[in-house]
């Protein structure tokens, strides 16, 4: 079961009137925008971590990786 939190934001009265005029639902827009920003930042964090790991990963050959996978499979 998902829990929810309430987030509020203050906007100018005129903007609120225009939103009502155009039938804009702020909850949908805010939710979507926050989700997109979280995804963007998660991707950015993954990219930074990969950049840190790249020098280490470059030292491991494909043959070594294949050998480790085979060894792991055989030990199960």
Image (tube, rainbow, N blue to C red):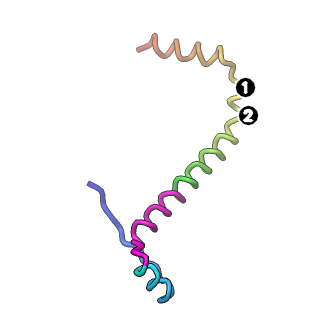
Secondary structure at badge 2 equals helix
Local crowd size for mark 2, using a 10 Å CA cut-off: few (<14), some (14–19), many (≥20): few
Question: Mark 1 and mark 2 in contact (Cβ < 8 Å)?
Answer: yes
Write the start and end of the magenta stretch as one range. 22-37
Q: In the rendering, at what x and y percent does residue 36 appear?
A: 51, 57
Q: Position of residue 1 (x, y in %)?
A: 26, 54
Q: In front here: 12 or 37?
A: 12
Image spot of residue 46 (x, y percent): 60, 45
Q: Is 29 situated above or below 49?
A: below
Residue 28, x across and y down, in percent: 40, 66
Where disc 1 sits, the SS reads loop
> Where 69 sits versus 27, above or below?
above
Q: Residue furthest bottom?
A: 13
Residue drawn at (49%, 63%) of the image: 34
Residue 16 placement: quadrant: bottom left
Circle on res. 55 = 2
- Location of mark 1 (residue): 59
The majority secondary structure of the magenta stretch comes to helix
Name the residue rendered at 46%, 10% in the picture. Answer: 74
């Amino acid at each position: 079961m998902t829990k929810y939190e309430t987030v509020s934001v203050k906007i100018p009265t005129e903007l609120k009137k225009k939103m009502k005029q155009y039938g804009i639902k702020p909850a949908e827009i805010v939710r979507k925008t926050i989700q997109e920003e979280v995804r963007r930042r998660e991707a950015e964090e993954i990219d930074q971590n990969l950049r840190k790991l790249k020098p280490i990963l470059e030292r491991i050959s494909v043959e070594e990786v294949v050998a480790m996978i085979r060894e792991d499979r055989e030990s199960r």
